[in-house]
Amino acid sequence: MPGEEYSIERIDIHKDYCPENCKWIEQKKQPQNRRNTIWVIVDGQKMCLKEAARCMGVDYSTMHKAYTRGRLEMVIDSNEYLKHHKKEVKT
């Protein structure tokens, strides 16, 4: 059994919590496996919007508002993180 930083996740959410349908996953990654997670691609790397905001030093609520208003590219283009790292972001 892994350490306390892990929890059990179902492989197929429509099936029961049985040994063949479960796996260990880091607790910090488990919330990303929700149906409503917003995924973006930053410099060719797929990550959730919350992780992208954290990497760029932008408040998540700012990123989410920009995403829902179709202005995510504007926030990303004006971000200092991207200016220094020349990242490409796609939604």
Image (cartoon, rainbow, N blue to C red):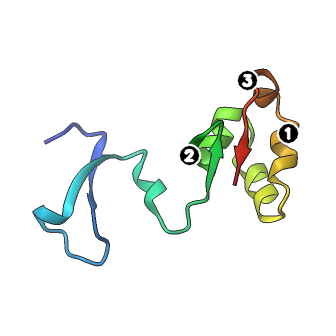
Mark 1 and mark 3 in contact? Answer it, CB < 8 Å: no
What is the residue that sits farthest to the front in this orientation? 44
Q: Secondary structure at mark 3?
A: helix
Q: How busy is the neighbourhood of tag 3: few (under 14 within 10 Å), some, or many (20 plus)?
A: few
Q: In the visual, does 51 lie left or right of 83?
A: left
Task: Give the CA separation, mark 2 to mark 1.
Answer: 18 Å
Q: Nearer the viewer, residue 3 or 15?
A: 15
For the point 28% across and 44% down, the residue is: 6
Number of residues whose C-alpha sits closer than 10 Å to that of mark 2, classed few (under 14), some (14–19) or many (20 or more): some
- Kindly indicate the quadrant of the structure image that contains residue 82: top right
Vertical relation: 51 (above or below) 64: above
Snapshot quadrant of residue 26: top left
Q: Are marks 3 and 2 in contact (CB under 8 Å)?
A: no
Circle 2: element type: strand
Number of residues whose C-alpha sits closer than 10 Å to that of mark 1, classed few (under 14), some (14–19) or many (20 or more): some
- The residue that label 3 is drawn on is 85
Give the left or right position of residue 87, taking residue 31 as reference: right
Q: Is residue 29 above or below residue 38?
A: above
Q: Which residue is mark 1?
A: 77
Tag 1: amino acid: Asp
Q: Which callout, 2 or 1, points at the residue further toward the start of the chain?
A: 2
Please report the residue visible at 28 percent of the width from the left and 70 percent of the height from the top.
12
The residue to which callout 2 is attached is 46
Which residue type does callout 2 highlight?
A: Lys
C-alpha separation, residue under disc 3 versus residue under disc 2: 16 Å
- Tell me which label, 1 or 3, sits earlier in the chain: 1
Left or right of 34 on screen, residue 70: right
At 84% from the left edge and 64% from the top edge, which residue is drawn?
69
Three-letter amino acid code of the residue under disc 3: His
Sequence-first tag of 3 and 2: 2
Give residue 7's position: percent from left, percent from top: 27, 50
Of residues 31 and 39, the one drawn nearer to the viewer in this rendering: 39
